[in-house]
Every structure is written in C-alpha cells, then in structure tokens.
Image (cartoon, rainbow, N blue to C red):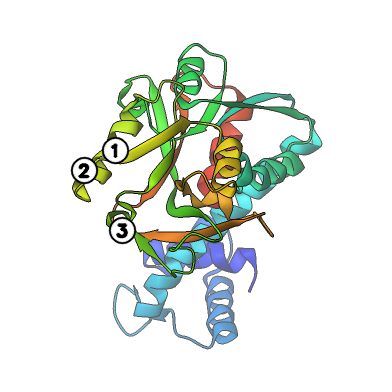
Amino acid sequence: MNINQLRYFIAVAEYRSFTKAANQYYISQTAITQQIQALEENMDVQLIDRSVRPIALTGAGNVFLGEAKAILERMDAAISRVREASTGLMGSLRVGYTKGYERSDLSELLRLFHEDYPNILITCWRCDTDMLAAGLLNGDYDIIFTWDSTNIRREENVGYRLIERVPLVVALYQDHPLARRSALSRRELKGEPILYMTPSATGESFGDSHFLELYRKAGYQPDILFRSNDTESILMMVAAGQGISILPSYVTSKLKDADNLVFVPLVGEEEYEEIIAVWTKGEQSLALQHFLARIEEER
C-alpha cells in the first residue's frame, strides 16, 4: 500500500469512475485500474463493485474510504508540522492550569508539543480557577486547563474543549474504618469530618455549588472541617488523621507509597470532575493554533 494508491482510490470512490479518476491525475485508466487492483490484493478485500454502472463501493470500500481520507489528512498535517519546525516556527505559549493538575498528563502533552516546535517557549502558571478565568479574559494566558468553577464556558468570546472527565476518589488515613473498602459512595461519608478541596480561592464558586449539591442529593450537609484549594495541605491533614477528603484522581494516581494515605474510588453517576481547555476566540497566535490542533489529535 502506498500514498498514491490511497489517492487514486479516493478519486475513484468520489467520481465513481476509473476514467474520471485517471484524468484527475493525468494517468491512463489502465494504470489507475492496476493500482486499485494492487491495493485490493494487498488488503485481500474487494473495495470496488465493478458489476454495476456506475461502479460502487463495497461495504468494506465505504469503511476504507473514511480511513484513507484520515490517513492522508494526518500525513499532510505531519508534513506541515515538520516543515514549520524545520523553518524555526517561533513564539510563545502561555498555559495556565488549576492547582493539582500538575500531576495529570498535561506535562506529557506539553512535552510532545515542544518536540514538534522546539522554538516555541511554553510558560506554565499554576493558579486558582477564578484567577485563571480572569487571567484568560484579561489576556494573561493563551489557554487554561481548569474546572469550570466560574462558568466561563458561557462567555461569548471563548472557545473550550472537554479534555477529560476525571473520576473522584476518597482520601483516607490508613487506620480509618473505611480504608479497606474497594469503593465508596458519598452517602457512606455522612458524619465524616471533610477536608474540602475547593477549586476557587473564595470557596463560593459555581463549581463549589455543584459539588455541595451532590452532598445534598446524598441526603445530608457535609461536616466541613477545613476548606482549601491546596491539595498538598489537604493530603497532609488527611495523613495526620484529621479528616477525609474527596479529590480528583489526577491528584492521587501518581502518588506511590504515600505516607499513611489510602485512596478509594468514589462511585456514582456524577462523581467526576470535568477538566476543560479554554481559550479566547478571535485572532490567535500560530503557537496557539498549532497547540489546539495537537489537543484535537490527542483526544
């Protein structure tokens, strides 16, 4: 299989004619027919139904048409990136992210982007969600990765993309009676002193209202002992046996041999946190355009 065979197949499929496809590429009908036959033999599957007029795609041919187009699009994008990297595409990309998200796969995304565009300086800023939203709208960041605690996606001048729905976990100290459970529901945490992780600096955001509503649905008001957006402080207090906490799993998934800490999955249809990437619409730098394209490829 080669690139020309893919192009010839797409042309035949779209024109439903070997002759018209051959004319597009200024080759003989015999040549393009032979290339399609070679493609079918290589794949050991019939792509074109030649028994009807005009010719038609088989079921396998219809599936392969979409795949062939995707392969060519990906190759064109790869060639474009390589050319830009070779000519030294320069610039900067200012990335803001919510506290705790440094333990996610964001660093891997940034590393891959840096490999493609080594002359683009990526700067990173770790902030509260409300400060991230304000900073984006003020032009301090090119893109932010955040909980939507300020309902920023309702702003008319922003674009956003759901990056992931992160499962929630219960953080407990090792001697806690629930520490050996394989899973927990929010209802089972009634009466526990909660070290509450808030996404914002105020603790009174749109995101806070959402998660406090989940306690109400579970049938009680939580006994919140402490509020903070500093995950490290919360984990230290849990390890000291002062309470338990509910945290997104990106905070805990890479923790190994955590001192006196146990993490148990929290079950329930709404027990997750959404992380979105948000940027402002309008004129965008080339660095941001290519970064957004990278996000689309990775998701």
Toward the viewer: 101 or 251?
251
Residue located beneath label 2 in the image: 216
Mark earlier in primary sequence (2, 3): 3
Residue located beneath label 1 in the image: 212
Whole-Å distance between the Cαs marked 1 and 3? 15 Å
Q: Amino acid at mark 1?
A: Leu
Q: Is residue 249 visible?
A: yes
Whole-Å distance between the Cαs marked 2 and 1? 7 Å
| Residue drawn at x 62%, y 40% as measured from the top left | 102
Dots 2, 1 in contact, CB < 8 A: yes
Of tags 2 and 3, which is closer to the observer? 3
Residue 135 percent location from the top left of the image: 51, 16
| Residue drawn at x 60%, y 84% as measured from the top left | 42
For the residue labelled by badge 3, is the local secondary structure a helix, a strand or a loop? helix
Whole-Å distance between the Cαs marked 2 and 3? 13 Å
Q: Quadrant of residue 230?
A: top right
| Residue drawn at x 41%, y 35% as measured from the top left | 225
